[in-house]
Amino acid sequence: MTLPDIPLSPAGADRTFQVDLRGLVDLLSHHLYSSPRVYLRELMQNAVDALTARRRLEPAAPADAFGIRLYADGSVVRVEDDGVGLTEGDVHTFLATIGRSSKRAEKIAEQRADFIGQFGIGLLSCFLVADEIHVLSRSAATPQAPAVEWRGRGDGSYTVRTLPASARPRPGTTVTLTPRADAGEWTRPAQVHTLARHFGSLLRHPVTFDDGTGGPGAPVNPEPAPWARTYPTPGARSRALAAYGAEVFGFTPLDTIELDLPAVGLKGIACVLPEAVPAGRRHGHRVHVKGMLLSEQAEEILPEWAFFVRCVVDAESLRPTASRESLYEDDTLAAVRDALAERLRAWIARAAASDPDLLARFLQAHHLAVKSLAVHDDEILRMLLPWLPFETTDGHSTLDEFARTHRTVLVTSSVEEFRQVAAIASAAGLGVVNGGYTYDRELVHRLPEIRPEVSVADLDPATLTAHLDPVDRETELAAAAYLALARDALAVFDCDVALRTFQPASAPALLMDSREARHERTRSQLAREQEGGVWGDILGALRQEAPRAQLILNQLNPLVRTAVSIDEPELARTSAEALYGQAAMLSRRPLRPAESSLINRSFLDLLAHALRKDS
């Protein structure tokens, strides 16, 4: 195949990128914007920015002098504003150049923070629902300039022509779209009205909607934001904010926290969720920028630990990304996140100091969130640690209540360890806290900072064993043969066997075996298997004396007293295996395959023995 000759430009000559507008629109629809519905937001946003610029030109004009009017009758969608408008030169410069924004031009660029849009691509979103965009505009900055008409098409072509002033008697801009047949979902009158309220309910300029039926235009944003209104009493204000939170999020807040950061012009509310949420699950927050809805899923506005609230805020100084559907991560956003976190801490402090009922309901639902905060926040730790619930040998209890009856608090390193020892430790009068849940062990160890009279230590198996009473010498000698057979049967699990007395008597055996001990035994076994190889040298260097598990049989239990008197060796071994299996299951830790096999085998062997005896 022969390639055609392509004329070359002189060396070093500048060349211009060629843009496939259809390809660019496809890119926007699939990767920049989340849905075609954003076309209306972009048009409303451009209208708001135009009104902002017009207000600069005429600062003395009445507050309601300039507004936005939406129209949709099923055949067209129209957005009209009383903004600053465009001259013919502006149209060529800004509407026909992708990426060029009028908000960046000349002096306005120095004050761009007053505008929502700053990227100059928003108008392209209209091609998501229409093949042609019709713009009619007249400049307020240059009153003598004629009206100008721009028609842009999805294939990248456009036309511009000037019209007499009568074509648009007043300054401003009108954008008209003729929707494609496949865009009806987003351009029906009812849907346009719904989208307008969704995106623009907090806009500061008056916005109306006309569905073409001849009636008066319906207000899109009839009232200011609820936090910007005045109320007769503080109680009425609280109820109104809670009602707004329920309307926005669909739940009745446990409480509402007003948010006000004057430095960035942020106002809003945080709604405390009435129920617990899964650990680590972050809710999106509803963020408006200068009244325009930016995102309903803005996770980045709050720190990760604040998953017990959902926020709706309106800010002046936060920067949107190019899609204007999330926030740009910069120093301002980081400062806002820290400041809002401080507001949440202050609310928790106020509840702890003045509203114990609210605090109790809050902690009942969100103790995990508070625990995650208390780990890193000494102030919250001091205020709330005594009130946080923990699983203990006295049941679910606050540390304050638990410390009143246990001056020495023992804490386990895992849930399974707590399950193993809870009943026996409780009967022995030991105070043990389950430290296996996220944050719990670390927090319990900090209890002496709040209650100096209390000591905290990790639970050591030897500590519990020391509280179990030994049996008398005669009983020990009588059970010696059985214990020897039991040790031999359980040697495969690196498990020793001992006989003690302890409460409750209904517990036949206690298996003392930590996760760390099992890991060390597994590593030692691997080292033995790899003896002589490279891995054997490495693991041998790491090997310690592997701690053994211990099965402690309870002499007070009738079943154990019967078992230790068995004189038939095979039956004695089987009974020891069965006692080990039952104790392992009661510990609620994952069973190893060999243990599952042992449990099944010992059960069947005992059943077979019972059947032979009865026959």
Image (cartoon, rainbow, N blue to C red):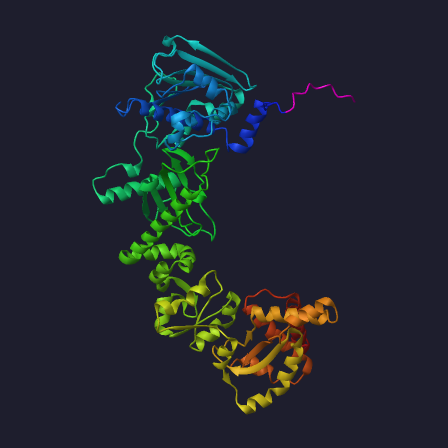
Vertical relation: 178 (above or below) 393: above
Query: Residue at coordinates 41% horizontally, 25% vertically from top-left?
Result: 106
* Front in this rendered view, residue 475 or 169: 169
Whether residue 601 is visible to the viewer of this picture, yes or no, is no
Within the magenta stretch, is there residue 5?
Answer: yes
Query: Residue at coordinates 27% horizontally, 26% vertically from top-left?
Result: 63
Going by the picture, which residue comes out furthest to the bottom? 474
Assign the N terminus to one quadrant of the image: top right
Vertical relation: 479 (above or below) 252: below
Q: Percent position (x, y) of residue 187?
A: 46, 23
* Front in this rendered view, residue 250 or 608: 250
Q: Quadrant of residue 215?
A: top left
Q: Percent position (x, y) of residue 111?
A: 37, 31
Query: Residue at coordinates 51% horizontally, 32% vertically from top-left?
Result: 33
Q: Percent position (x, y) of residue 167?
A: 39, 10
Q: Quadrant of residue 81?
A: top left
Q: Is residue 482 left or right of residue 66?
A: right
Q: Is residue 611 left or right of residue 90?
A: right
Q: Which residues are magenta?
A: 1-11
Within the magenta stretch, is there residue 599?
Answer: no
Q: Is residue 462 left or right of residue 171?
A: right
